[in-house]
Amino acid sequence: MSRSVFVRFNSSHGFPVEVESDTSIFQLKEVVAKRRGVPAGQLRVIFAGKELRNDLSVQSCDLDQQSIVHVVLRPWREDQAGEAPGQDGPHSTTVGSEREPESLTRVDLSSSVLPSHSGGLAVILNSDDTGTLPA
């Protein structure tokens, strides 16, 4: 039975996708990837607050006619350098098998390129590179 699923890609305006009941989540990712020009393996499908596994079917996820799913790009991390982005197969299940993505709101300033000295809670930026603390 054919049904229309409404896809919101990266929080943008959505678009309808016609799928069959036995369509897998990975096949849905492939349709979205083709329309948006991104690798299917980098996509995550979210419905009712949960990431849907690639091997599940649209019907087994209780996606009714006109259901809204959110499709987002999986964050790429440097520790994935050995993996080519987008190499998830139709039977891969990434839920719970990898670390949580690094925070987008926290910035590590420990390797800052600005010369500075720490004085308690304050950081004093130097305008010269003498290495002495201001008095």
Image (cartoon, rainbow, N blue to C red):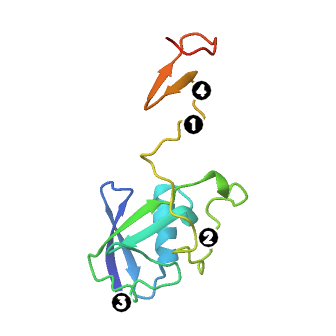
> Who comes first in sequence, dot 3 or dot 2?
3
Q: Alpha carbon of mark 1 to alpha carbon of mark 3: how far?
A: 56 Å
What residue sits right under mark 2 in the picture? 88
Between 130 and 106, the one nearer to me in the picture: 130
Viewer-closest of 61 and 19: 61
Compare residues 39 and 133 and report the one nearer the observer.
Answer: 133
Residue on which disc 3 sits: 1
Q: Which residue is mark 4?
A: 113
Q: Amino acid at mark 2?
A: Asp
User: Where residue 53 is drawn, which disc sits there?
Assistant: none
Q: Position of residue 25 (x, y in %)?
A: 47, 77
Name the residue at 64% across, 11% down: 130
Q: Earlier in the sequence, mark 2 or mark 1?
A: 2
Residue type, mark 4 in image: Val
Residue 2 % position (x, y): 35, 84
Q: Residue at x 63, y 13 (%)?
A: 129
Of the residues tagged 2 and 1, which is closer to the observer?
1
Q: In percent of the image, x 61 and y 70: which residue is there? A: 88
Q: Nearer the viewer, mark 1 or mark 4?
A: 1
Residue 5 sits in quarter: bottom left
Residue type highlighted by circle 1: Ser
Q: Do the residues under discs 1 and 4 have CB atoms within 8 angstroms?
A: no
Q: Amino acid at mark 3?
A: Met
